């Protein structure tokens, strides 16, 4: 059994998973309009981290500040919280680091001498190296679906038996490079986005880092709150249609949903957490995929109205938030949603709903025609009195 | 006008990487999208950049582009009326 | 895993299953072995390289088998060359960000281009490694079969630095011995 044993989210909405989930539950969002940022001629609406706060936190916490980029600091801070909460010995050789990012340190590109960490594997080695881990880390770079792909890659490596734990980190930071590109695609909404809504005009970008610690579990007693999250199913399919435009038939997303439904109990699914970027085409595509998979009536939701699209972090933080929602017995509200705006129904709601089910599906779609999905199921587990360091029972 | 049309065709070939094409291969009146040259949504976005860079025309709403980018003739007509450089 | 076919493309030569079939540029290779896909010229260099390797590997594979193939590729430089080219379009004094370049600032677009051309609806994944590492590529590729059952796996290295420094070393493999004709 593969299970998620610890997690963290760092975002403008909080520095821990608990703070983030509480912000979401309170309907908070840090999507703001930013003018004269990154020297861009056009304003944009995004959820941005306080850079000084992150630097100060890192300085307080780390042994030295020599040469870590903002991206690397965020990855390290997020992983540190998750690692310490399950007392993982991260330097151990049965731990593998898997990093999900779309553009990593691209904000450092074009400085005097290109930052070596612009090569993502170099940056990943620095991050794993910080924790004393010497296994070559794995970097998934699959555009917007990276966060789910990283989980899938980690799960396969754990099932393969070579490693017992995976530290899966997703992170992206915004920059002139990324914002200008999305602006050139006319993909950005000038105001907070409205997933699935009739009046949606585009997406917002956001910054976050998230960490999930996955374990190939052999033990029988567990720390924590009496439940753990078991991996249930995963899938990845290409649309084979266009490198930037979502498929008009939702082909890849439909195939992902179909695969996952074949390996999960439909009656136990609380909700599908959709990509829900709030671009006209993405949300329409997801409605078609849900319809084709016979899931129009299944509750669905999206987190982009709180966080914006956090790129390589999205698959990680949205998975973690879905877990916390089920633990709290709710299907979170889709902030920004008001009225149906897709050809087929998406069972989204502007307010939260209750659920007593234990499984959820998380799906993502992105440039390159990629679509990926993953499902987890909550399991009640026997608690142990004490939890020894290293996660050994 | 003919001079502008030829210039636009040259710029199109370069900006959209229409390798192996010359300006005589592009029919001034023929549709650029769908059939015709088979351009797609990224090409349309790149055309918006071309109009701004070369002719100082800012199209903010991509939907406007649909009519303007119907053919080289419609682009030339729009450019001649709206250019600022 | 069972290797069906193996291609290596370098600036010097193109080897298919160990035999040299071409010497020359990637564009030359396209004109010799494809030639019917104008979208090739819209691609960045990384995509052109991966696209041509896939053309050579997949040309004899029937469409129904291709449909359920998986594409899992690796490199070192990501999309760094195109990142730099895009960066040039957003300088302060000449700010005209190019969408046609921006879309290629993601290394996984090469998997998408191959999927579109060959109507492959299976998995598409891209990984960045510090250096060419055959053991790690093998590990990750073999692990694909743990959670999925693709008909075929198109896997390997595709890295582009400049026109004198590039390498596609890609293979078509199956989980076990299978007749693909």
Image: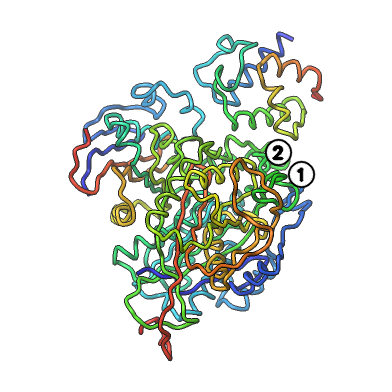
Where residue A376 appears, as percent x and y from the top left, is 45, 64
Q: CA gap, disc 1 to disc 2? A: 9 Å
Asked whether, in this view, residue A362 is left or right of residue C149, the answer is: right
Q: Nearer the viewer, mark 1 or mark 2?
A: 1
At 50% from the left and 79% from the top, the residue drawn is A84
Chain ID, mark 1: A
Where residue A30 appears, as percent x and y from the top left, is 72, 62
Q: Residues within 10 Å of mark 2 (few under 14, many from 20)?
A: some
At 65% from the left and 72% from the top, the residue drawn is A22
Asked whether, in this view, residue C1 is left or right of residue B65, the answer is: left
Task: Judge by depth and name the residue closer to the eye, A377 or A161.
Answer: A377
Q: What residue sits right under mark 2 in the picture?
A: C95
| Residue A181 versus residue A309 in the image, above or below | above
At 74% from the left and 10% from the top, the residue drawn is B1
Chain ID, mark 2: C
Where residue A214 appears, as percent x and y from the top left, is 42, 69
Task: Judge by depth and name the residue closer to the eye, A307 or A327.
Answer: A327
Kindly check if marks 1 and 2 are in contact, taking CB atoms under 8 A apart as contact. Answer: yes
Q: Residues within 10 Å of mark 1 (few under 14, many from 20)?
A: few
Asked whether, in this view, residue C14 is left or right of residue A228, the answer is: left
Q: What residue sits right under mark 1 in the picture?
A: A41
Where residue B4 appears, as percent x and y from the top left, is 71, 14
| Residue C22 versus residue A51 in the image, above or below | above
Q: Quadrant of the C terminus of chain A?
A: bottom left
Task: Judge by depth and name the residue closer to the eye, B25 or C59.
Answer: C59
Secondary structure beneath label 1: loop
Question: Could you tell me if residue C136 is visible in this image?
Answer: no
Q: Quadrant of the N terminus of chain A?
A: bottom left
């Amino acid at each position: 059994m593969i299970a998620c044993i610890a997690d963290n989210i760092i975002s403008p909405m909080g520095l821990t998973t608990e703070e983030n989930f509480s912000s979401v539950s309170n309907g908070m969002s840090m999507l703001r309009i930013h003018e004269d940022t990154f020297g861009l001629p056009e304003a944009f609406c995004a959820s941005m981290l306080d850079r000084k706060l992150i630097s100060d936190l890192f300085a307080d916490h780390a042994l030295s500040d020599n040469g870590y980029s903002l991206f690397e600091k965020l990855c390290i801070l997020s992983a540190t919280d998750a690692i310490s909460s399950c007392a993982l010995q991260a330097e151990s050789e049965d731990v593998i680091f898997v990093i999900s990012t779309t553009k990593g340190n691209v904000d450092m590109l074009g400085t005097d001498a290109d930052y070596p960490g612009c090569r993502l594997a170099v940056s990943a080695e620095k991050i794993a190296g910080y924790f004393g881990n010497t296994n070559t880390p794995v970097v998934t770079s699959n555009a917007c679906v990276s966060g789910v792909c990283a989980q899938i890659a980690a799960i396969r490596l754990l099932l393969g038996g070579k490693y017992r734990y995976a530290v899966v980190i997703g992170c992206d930071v915004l920059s002139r490079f990324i914002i200008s590109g999305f602006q050139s695609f006319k993909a950005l909404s000038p105001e907070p986005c409205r997933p699935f809504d009739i009046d949606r005009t585009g997406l917002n970008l956001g910054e976050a880092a998230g960490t999930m610690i996955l374990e190939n579990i052999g033990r029988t007693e567990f720390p924590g709150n009496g439940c753990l999250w078991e991996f249930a199913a995963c899938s990845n399919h290409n649309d084979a249609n266009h490198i930037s435009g979502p498929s008009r038939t939702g082909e890849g997303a439909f195939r992902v949903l179909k695969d996952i439904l074949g390996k999960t109990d439909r009656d136990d699914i609380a909700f599908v957490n959709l990509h829900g970027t709030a671009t006209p085409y993405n949300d329409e595509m997801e409605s078609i995929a849900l319809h084709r998979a016979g899931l129009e009536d299944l509750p669905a939701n999206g987190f982009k109205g709180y966080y914006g699209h956090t790129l390589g972090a999205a698959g990680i933080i949205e998975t973690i938030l879905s877990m916390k929602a089920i633990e709290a017995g709710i299907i979170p509200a889709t902030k920004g949603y008001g009225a149906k705006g897709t050809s087929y129904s998406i069972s989204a709601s502007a307010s939260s709903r209750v659920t007593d089910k234990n499984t959820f599906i998380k799906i993502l779609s992105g440039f390159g025609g990629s679509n990926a999905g993953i499902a987890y199921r909550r399991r009640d587990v026997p608690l142990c009195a004490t939890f020894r360091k290293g996660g050994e029972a | 006008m003919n001079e502008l049309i030829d210039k636009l065709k040259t710029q199109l070939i370069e900006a959209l990487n229409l390798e192996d094409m010359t300006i005589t291969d592009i029919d001034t009146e023929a549709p650029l999208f769908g059939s015709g040259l088979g351009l797609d949504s990224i090409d349309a976005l790149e055309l918006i950049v071309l109009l701004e860079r070369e002719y100082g025309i800012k199209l903010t709403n991509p939907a406007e582009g649909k009519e303007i980018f119907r053919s080289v003739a419609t682009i030339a007509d729009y450019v001649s009326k709206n250019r600022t450089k | 895993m069972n290797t069906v076919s193996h291609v290596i493309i370098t600036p010097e030569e193109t080897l298919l299953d160990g035999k040299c079939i071409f010497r020359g540029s990637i564009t030359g290779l396209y004109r010799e072995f494809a030639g019917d896909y104008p979208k090739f010229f819209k691609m960045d260099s990384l995509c052109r390289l991966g696209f041509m390797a896939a053309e050579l590997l997949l040309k004899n594979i029937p469409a129904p088998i291709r449909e359920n193939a998986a594409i899992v590729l690796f490199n070192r430089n990501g999309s760094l060359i195109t990142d730099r080219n895009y960066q040039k379009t957003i300088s302060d004094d000449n700010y005209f960000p190019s969408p046609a370049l921006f879309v290629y600032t993601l290394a996984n677009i090469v998997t998408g281009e191959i999927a579109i051309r060959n109507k492959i609806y299976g998995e598409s994944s891209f990984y960045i490694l510090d250096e060419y590492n055959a053991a790690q590529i093998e590990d990750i590729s073999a692990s694909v079969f743990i959670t999925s059952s693709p008909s075929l796996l198109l896997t390997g290295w595709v890295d582009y630095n400049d026109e004198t420094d590039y390498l596609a070393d890609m293979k078509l493999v199956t989980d076990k011995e299978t007749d693909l004709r």
